[in-house]
């Protein structure tokens, strides 16, 4: 054959040409090359890209890809909830016939590529629930066919581009739960959307959210924000005045810090300020609520004076916690809160009086408090079951700072909670929280619902603890400090962004708590973090795969499928990214009692 080809050079040339033509015919389309660039940029996934092969002529049979039947151009790329980790590459802009791009619920990061503005046929763009940062490209204003744009629950910053106002076909728009700032465009299509589209961006302003932009004044004629005429000299003098005030304030702050430092040194010196020492010897008093503490003040003070570090059962968070044992055998938990502002004593006492009046079987009882020169000592019931955190996560558990009863020494391993016990704890916690939200006057927002703030009695009945303390200890001048009350993993998205606590942010935290009880792992367990998720992200992924039942702790005995499905449905409502979709805690209790708690004994357990 070789000698024949050498003798027939023309025939050989024809073969080479045919080979090149065939190879060119098999070459991947430009849309396929753009998608392979996307695949290369993604560093981790759940295997969605396994059939994305370079040798294919087109990507139309790849998972998550849909093409136009005639042109073979990609019109739909749907890769939601596939654990994608990585940036969105600029090559995505080559898919200029794309109509739907769905990448929500992943762990994509980096900036939004301006090249996406080339996809002028795009009608639906879903990018919510990722870690995308940077700015919203002004090129998005070229997506004139866009009907849906969802960029919520990312870490976008900067302003909303004025160009988005040109998207006349936009019927659904959501940029909530980001770090966006500045004025919201209001001369075009964005004027049609209300506060729910922008919630959770602390520094946005505009008529859509009823917030006047601070760097402009309102024109009396049409409300348009315009600079005030002749303000040049005024602003200059204002800046001088502000500068002078700031200088004086700084000097006063330095003097105050020096005074405070001298005071601390004089009163405490090199002593351990966590111990009581002589602080109780003068000027101390005990306030008892409604006869809940049947001891003479002198007896309580004597016990407090004799306490030392051996009495500590927890520390951190709101303060050090001690075990207070009286001579008659009664035991109490004592939470020590260091005072920071003497002028707030009257406010502090009034708020404690309110908290002491809150009584419910699913709330930890505040019996009274002791006033000392440097701290408040809150006296609670001691619950022998410890915290739910300790029961769920022993033996790998670390000391939680805000737990009333958590021991500092390593806890003994315990058996995993069975299904009925978990359900009973969930119901008890829900009832306690519902009482705070709906039956107290004034109503109380907890702000720090988590497993270490759910305490258990000897029968594993749940008691909600530390309610009211976050509000009590916050800086009255700055609502932003309220965010430190919460614990990462339990915080609602809008709470993390705005720092404003509401009943719905408590409901979100309760939903996370339900998932933690079902799963047996903390919301930010390493197994979730490795996937770029938390426990809510993991649930959302499982829901997308129709595998949500897999979230249940495999060590939990007696799981009932019907009850589990109802509980998962409730949890999904509680952790909705939209606050208005979450049920009230009264409704949560109703659903637990009607759909989850069954009157018949479980078939999985022997009768007592």
Image (spheres, rainbow, N blue to C red):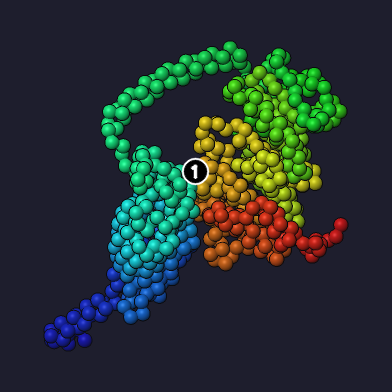
Q: Is residue 150 visible?
A: yes
The image position of residue 511, as x and y in percent, is 62, 52
Quarter of the image holding residue 273? top right
Residue closer to the observer: 550 or 127 = 127
Q: Quadrant of the C terminus?
A: bottom right
Of 193 and 94, which appears nearest the observer? 193
State the image quarter where residue 58 is shown.
bottom left
Answer few, some or many: residues within 10 Å of disc 1's Cα (few below 14, many 20 plus, some between 14 and 19): many
State the image coordinates of residue 111 (x, y, percent, origin top left).
36, 52
State the image coordinates of residue 116 (x, y, percent, origin top left): 32, 60
Of the 4 image quadrants, the one containing the N terminus is bottom left
Residue at the disc numbered 1 = 498
Looking at the picture, how far across and down is residue 335, in whole percent? 69, 30
Residue at image position (38%, 49%) is 184
**Residue 67 horizontal side relative to residue 320, left or right:** left
Placement of 381 over or under 561, stated as above or below: above
Q: Closest to the observer: 294 or 347?
A: 347
Q: Residue at x 75, y 53 (%)?
A: 424
Q: How many marks?
A: 1
Residue drawn at (34%, 54%) of the image: 187
């Amino acid at each position: 054959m070789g000698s024949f080809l050498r003798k027939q050079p023309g025939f050989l040339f024809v073969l080479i040409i045919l080979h090149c033509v065939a190879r060119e015919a098999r070459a991947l389309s430009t849309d396929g090359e753009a998608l392979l660039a996307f695949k290369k940029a993604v560093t981790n996934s759940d295997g969605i890209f396994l059939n994305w092969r370079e040798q294919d002529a087109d990507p139309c049979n790849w998972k998550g890809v849909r093409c136009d039947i005639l042109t073979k151009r990609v019109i739909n790329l749907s890769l939601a909830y596939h654990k994608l980790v990585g940036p969105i590459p600029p090559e995505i802009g080559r898919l200029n016939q794309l109509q739907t791009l769905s990448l929500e619920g992943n762990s994509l990061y980096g900036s939004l590529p301006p090249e996406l503005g080339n996809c002028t046929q795009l009608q639906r763009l879903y990018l919510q629930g990722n870690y995308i940062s940077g700015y919203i490209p002004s090129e998005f204003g070229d997506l004139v066919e866009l009907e849906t744009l969802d960029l919520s629950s990312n870490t976008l910053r900067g302003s909303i581009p004025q160009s988005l106002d040109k998207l006349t076909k936009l019927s659904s728009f959501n940029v909530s739960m980001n770090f966006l700032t500045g004025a919201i465009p209001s001369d075009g299509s964005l004027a049609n959307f209300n506060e729910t589209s922008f919630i959770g961006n602390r520094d946005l302003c505009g008529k859509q959210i009823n917030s006047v932009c601070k760097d402009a004044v309102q024109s009396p004629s049409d409300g348009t924000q315009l600079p005030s005429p002749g303000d040049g000299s005024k602003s200059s003098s204002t800046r001088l005045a502000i500068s002078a005030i700031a200088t004086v304030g700084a000097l006063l702050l330095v003097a105050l810090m020096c005074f405070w430092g001298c005071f601390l040194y004089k009163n405490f010196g090199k002593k351990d300020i966590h111990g009581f020492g002589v602080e109780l010897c003068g000027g101390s008093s005990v306030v008892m609520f409604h006869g809940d503490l049947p001891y003479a003040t002198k007896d309580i003070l004597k016990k407090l004076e004799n306490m030392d570090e051996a009495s500590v059962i927890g520390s951190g968070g709101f303060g050090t916690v001690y075990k207070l044992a009286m001579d008659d055998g009664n035991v109490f938990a004592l939470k020590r809160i260091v005072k920071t502002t003497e002028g707030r004593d009257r406010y502090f006492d009034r708020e404690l009086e309110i908290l002491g009046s809150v009584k419910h079987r699913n709330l930890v009882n505040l019996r009274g408090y002791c006033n000392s020169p440097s701290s408040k000592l809150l006296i609670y019931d001691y619950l022998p079951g410890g915290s739910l955190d300790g029961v769920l996560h022993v033996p790998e558990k670390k000391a939680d700072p805000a737990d009333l009863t958590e021991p500092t020494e390593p806890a003994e391993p315990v058996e995993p909670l069975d299904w009925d016990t978990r359900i009973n704890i969930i119901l008890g916690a829900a009832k306690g929280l519902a009482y705070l939200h709906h039956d107290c006057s004034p109503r109380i927002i907890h702000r720090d619902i988590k497993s270490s703030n759910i305490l258990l009695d000897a029968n594993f009945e749940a008691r909600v603890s530390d309610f009211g303390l976050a509000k009590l200890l916050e800086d009255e001048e700055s609502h932003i400090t309220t965010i430190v009350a919460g614990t990462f993993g339990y915080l609602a998205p809008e709470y993390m962004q705005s720092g404003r606590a509401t009943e719905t942010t408590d409901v979100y935290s309760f939903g996370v708590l339900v998932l933690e009880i079902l799963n047996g792992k903390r919301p930010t367990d390493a197994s979730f973090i490795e996937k770029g998720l938390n426990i809510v992200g993991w649930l959302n992924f499982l829901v997308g795969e129709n595998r949500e039942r897999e979230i249940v702790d495999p060590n939990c005995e007696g799981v009932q499928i019907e009850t589990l499905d109802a509980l998962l449905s409730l949890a999904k409502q509680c952790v909705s990214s939209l606050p208005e979709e979450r049920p009230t805690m009264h409704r949560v209790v109703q659903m637990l009692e009607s759909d989850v708690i069954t009157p018949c004994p479980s078939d999985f357990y022997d009768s007592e």
